[in-house]
Amino acid sequence: MRLLGLLAVSGLTLAAAHGAMAGERAAASVACSATETSLVYSCMITVEGKKTGQAVEAEALTVKADMPAMPMAHNVPPTQALAVEGKPGMYSATLELEMFGEWALAIDVDGVLAGTDQRVRDKVVVKQIFGKSHSMDMEHGSHQDDAGDQDAGSHSSHQGHGSASE
């Protein structure tokens, strides 16, 4: 009985320590627009703390594109996103895709909450549909233009794949 009580107290201590170490998760939104080159998109990525809404100042922000319908079928190399000067939490990246359709953008975040030393290490997955027309802001979804081509739109969805601090 005494051993059971000791194990329960130890378990609570470990759970509390894990919760304190887990820290902030990342949330991201992405808006991409077509460039003059076919299948090349200029993307603006905003990253903030999921709980606090504070901007995340990333030391490294990498974007990897994959098609959910054809996993690992396309060889799109990861691209490094660059911080937008004067806009904390905003990053720009250029994506060179292999075909139109729905793509999952896996954003690897490694940085700190703006103005703090609180680490944020996470992976955020945002889905977006890329078409023959211009991209549009992720929050509006996809739509058809007058010519019937599907615009790039998105289904903004955060699917955290675990924080590096977990």
Image: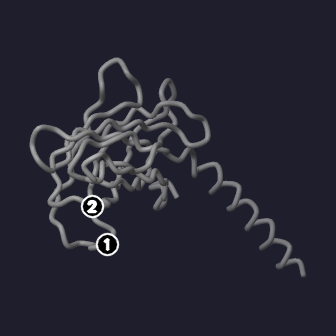
Of mark 1 and mark 2, the one earlier in the sequence is 1
Q: Nearer the viewer, residue 26 or 142?
A: 142
Residue 136, quarter of the rendered image: top left
- Residue 21 got which mark? none
Q: Which residue shows up at 47% across the image and 43% down it?
A: 139
Residue 52 picture location, percent across and down: 60, 35
Q: Amino acid at mark 1?
A: Ala
Residue 42 picture location, percent across and down: 22, 38
Q: Is residue 165 left or right of residue 84?
A: right
Which residue in the rendered view is the most extreme toward the left? Answer: 37
Answer whether labels 1 and 2 touch (C-beta < 8 Å). yes
* Viewer-side label of 1, 2: 2
Q: Is residue 65 left or right of residue 141?
A: left
Q: Is residue 1 left or right of residue 125?
A: right
Q: Which residue shows up at 36% across the image and 48% down it?
A: 153
Residue picked out by circle 2: 101
Q: Neighbour class for label 2 at 10 Å: few (<14), some, many (≥20)? A: some
Q: Nearer the viewer, residue 33 or 12?
A: 33
Q: How many marks?
A: 2
Position of 162 relative to 56 (above/below): below
Residue picked out by circle 1: 69
Q: Is residue 103 left or right of residue 6?
A: left
Q: Amino acid at mark 2?
A: Gly
What element does badge 2 sit on?
strand
Residue 156 picture location, percent across and down: 46, 50
What element does badge 1 sit on?
loop
C-alpha span from label 1 to label 2? 9 Å
Which residue in the rendered view is the most extreme toward the front? Answer: 146
